[in-house]
Image (cartoon, rainbow, N blue to C red):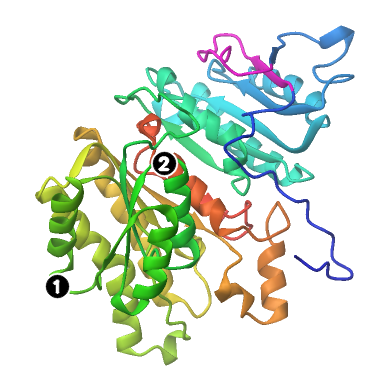
């Protein structure tokens, strides 16, 4: 139980996902600009409004809305942005606690006309600012949907509508055309998929393993031999298997590949979660502390990915998810080694994205911000409270928030999201 700190505002308990809860439990207000491309009629409890409701502005006298979704894909000039403002501004005040504001747009880089590109890029600034104005645990996110990717939007829209995205705010995601296999059961979207999680013995890694298993995956839990007891406990609890290996060892990629081939016939989801910190100021950072962090956090991922692809261990429609950090985006005092490794992960993901797409696979990164773990609980009080408060949701996230984002990226339906970095930070002001 969290203890309220005198003089500091109490944070709103966030609406988090459970398999028995509906996607939305209140009406969803949907609207669109002229020329919009997205069909939102499948959303439960959707109320479509292209004009004022009951003689008032959209949302006034109505709601509270579980979500507000506006399709801005048809906006092609600055004047068209008035449609966005006119629809959302009146309804925003009636967004329920832990509600969702979602704007759909066209990737600005796909627009050949400067006015259209400007209007679509304007959605980025709009949604980030709206996220900072949202109250009571509500979030705001932007999904750019490329032409031809409309049919592959559902898993991403479900993620942002649901409690799975509780700690994801102010993010911009691109969905591009891809072969998107159908999802038979949205409560178990990873059914019959083999998932591997490194660093699974504790903390965020254990939460990822548990969440993937909940969603139907057969999970292989990987960690160092020294964590064998905790690793076995996690694997036994979720009905998975445990594999002990030091991922920095020269033979680790081949050992892991052979195990997956022999025991599971390969892998469908691979989560690079293992990581370490050796924090020191730059002038006090030893060569060993530099090289050990880069070896675990970055080089091991590069070597494992190379082996998995070379040996065809990853099945078609495989998903590789790499845990980065907001430190790799914004930097952090005393973490030149850690921030370098986490920024390197982003570079790897962006470079590998196109080649993975050609194999009908994806690779993405998840960048957590301040997450409540044993490590953050050991921080000095002032440092810990600052970390919790410098985001739009006014609180730290939980390991499950990272895990839910990983599980979404692991779904078959998320084929159109590739080579991207998703921050799980409550819209931290750092690196925004």
Q: Residue at x 69, y 62 (%)?
A: 390
Is any part of residue 386 visible from this angle?
Answer: yes
Q: Is residue 7 left or right of residue 296?
A: right
Q: Quadrant of residue 225?
A: bottom left
Q: Residues within 10 Å of mark 1 (few under 14, many from 20)?
A: few
Nearest the eye: 243 or 65: 243
Q: Position of residue 117 (x, y in %)?
A: 49, 27
Q: Is residue 123 above or below residue 116?
A: below
| SS at circle 1 | loop
Nearest the eye: 215 or 323: 215
Say whether disc 2 or disc 1 marks the residue closer to the N-terminus: 1
Which label was assigned to residue 409?
2
Q: Residue at x 42, y 82 (%)?
A: 278
Q: Residue at x 64, y 24 (%)?
A: 69
Q: Which residues are magenta?
A: 27-45
Q: Position of residue 332 (x, y in %)?
A: 52, 72
Q: Give the residue pinned by disc 1.
A: 250
Q: Residue at x 53, y 12 (%)?
A: 39
Q: Is residue 237 above or below residue 96?
A: below
Q: Residues within 10 Å of mark 2 (few under 14, many from 20)?
A: many
């Amino acid at each position: 139980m969290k203890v309220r700190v005198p003089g500091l505002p109490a944070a709103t308990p966030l609406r988090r996902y459970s398999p028995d809860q509906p996607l939305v439990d209140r009406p969803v207000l949907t609207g669109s600009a002229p020329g919009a491309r997205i069909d939102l009629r499948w959303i439960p409890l959707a109320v479509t409004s292209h004009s004022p409701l009951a003689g008032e502005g959209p949302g006034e006298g109505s709601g509270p809305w579980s979500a507000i979704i506006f399709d801005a894909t048809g906006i092609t000039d600055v004047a068209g942005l008035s449609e966005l403002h006119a629809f959302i501004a009146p309804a925003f005040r009636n967004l329920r606690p832990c509600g969702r504001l979602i704007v759909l747009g066209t990737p600005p880089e796909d627009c050949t006309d400067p006015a259209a590109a400007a209007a679509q890029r304007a959605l980025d600034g709009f949604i980030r600012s709206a996220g900072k104005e949202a109250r009571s645990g509500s979030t705001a996110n932007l999904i750019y949907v490329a032409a031809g990717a409309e049919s592959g939007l559902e898993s991403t829209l479900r993620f942002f509508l649901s409690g799975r995205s509780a700690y994801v705010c102010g993010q911009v995601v691109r969905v591009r055309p891809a072969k998107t296999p159908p999802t038979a059961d949205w409560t178990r979207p990873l059914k019959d998929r083999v998932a591997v999680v490194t660093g699974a013995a504790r903390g965020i890694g254990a939460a990822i393993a548990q969440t993937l298993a909940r969603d139907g995956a057969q999970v292989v839990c990987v960690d160092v031999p020294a964590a064998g007891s905790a690793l076995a406990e996690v694997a036994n609890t979720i009905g998975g298997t445990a594999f002990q290996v030091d991922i920095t060892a020269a033979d680790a990629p081949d050992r892991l590949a052979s195990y997956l081939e022999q025991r599971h016939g390969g892998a469908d989801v691979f989560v690079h979660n293992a990581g370490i910190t050796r924090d020191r100021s730059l002038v006090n950072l030893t060569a060993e502390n530099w090289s050990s962090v880069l070896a675990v956090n970055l080089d091991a991922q590069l070597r494992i990915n190379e082996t998995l692809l070379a040996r065809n261990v990853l099945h078609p429609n495989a998903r590789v998810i790499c845990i980065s950090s907001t430190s790799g985006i914004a930097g952090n005092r005393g973490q030149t080694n850690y921030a370098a490794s986490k920024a390197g992960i982003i570079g790897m993901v962006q470079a590998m994205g196109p080649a993975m797409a050609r194999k009908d696979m994806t690779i993405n990164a998840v960048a957590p911000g301040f997450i409540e773990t044993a490590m953050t609980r050991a921080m000095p009080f002032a440092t810990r409270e600052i970390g919790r408060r410098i985001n739009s949701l006014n609180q730290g996230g939980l390991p499950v928030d990272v895990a839910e984002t990983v599980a979404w990226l692991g779904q078959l339906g998320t084929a159109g999201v590739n080579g991207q970095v998703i921050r799980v930070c409550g819209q931290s002001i750092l690196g925004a």
